[in-house]
Image: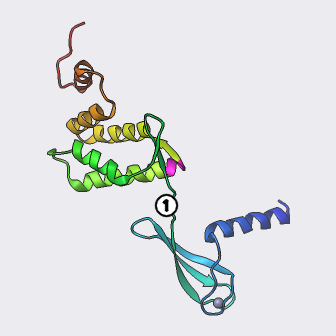
Amino acid sequence: MSKLLTSYILCFIIRYDTIWCMKCPFCGNLEDKVVDSREAEDGLAIRRRRECLKCARRFTTYEEIEERPLLVIKRDGRREPFDRKKLEVGVLKACEKRPIPFEKIEAIIDRLVRELRRGFPNEVNSKEIGERVIKELRKIDEVAYVRFASVYRQFKDAAEFTEEVRRLGKFPKRHA
Ligand SMILES: [Zn+2]
């Protein structure tokens, strides 16, 4: 590998790892190396332990991860900002009076939000969100699942709803 390419890759790795260098609070030098990186508890910030390349003293930076605006494309094509609260209300309603601990619901929503933000940089279809919630609820509680699905998929009539419930094995199979 050529020397230039090696140094270019190395430079990229350094830039990637440090994102950008911070001014040393002791000597003002602009070059440092990151000796430790860890995500803050809420996952919305990164704490980095840095070492100045000139004076070798260490300092900590706390970088907040800017939340990108995520737009939800509704059925009629209108866009609205993604609202975690709204998602939470819908899921909680489906789980009402079901033996599901609140922590479990929170954990599901946390994961869903993380996956959505990771998987969809700008826009996401409301259908995509709904289907993901349905998939999660199906794993933990059939009643909550059917409740959510019936609202979200807007079953056209009672027959369609019954069919969904039947698929869960709650009703005996009808003979064709
Ligand atoms: Zn320094």
Query: Percent from the top left, x then y, of residue 29?
Result: 68, 87
Colouring method of the image: rainbow
Q: Which residue is mark 1?
A: 67
Q: Main secondary structure of the magenta part?
A: loop
Nearest to the observer: residue 72 or residue 14: 72
Q: Image check: 38 left or right of 104?
A: right
The image quadrant of residue 151 is top left
Q: Residue at x 69, y 81 (%)?
A: 31
Answer with the quadrant where ligand 1 appears in the image.
bottom right
Question: Considering only vertical position in the picture, is 154 above or below 83?
Answer: above
30 up-or-down from 149: above or below: below
Relative to 171, 137 lies left or right: right
59 relative to 73, above or below: below
Where disc 1 sits, the SS reads: loop
Query: Magenta span covers which residues?
Result: 118-122
Where the C terminus falls, by quadrant? top left
Residue at the image point whose x is 39% and y is 49% from the top: 112
Residue 49, percent from left and from top: 54, 79
Q: Is residue 151 above or below residue 40?
A: above
| Callout 1 crowding tier (Cα within 10 Å): few <14, some 14–19, many ≥20 | few
> What's the amino acid at mark 1?
Glu
Q: Quadrant of the N terminus?
A: bottom right
Seen from the viewer's position, the closer of residues 57 and 109 is 109
Q: Residue at x 28, y 45 (%)?
A: 90
Q: Is residue 77 left or right of residue 132?
A: right
Residue at 39 percent of width and 66 percent of height: 42
Q: Is residue 131 magenta?
A: no
**Which residue is the extreme one toward the top?**
176
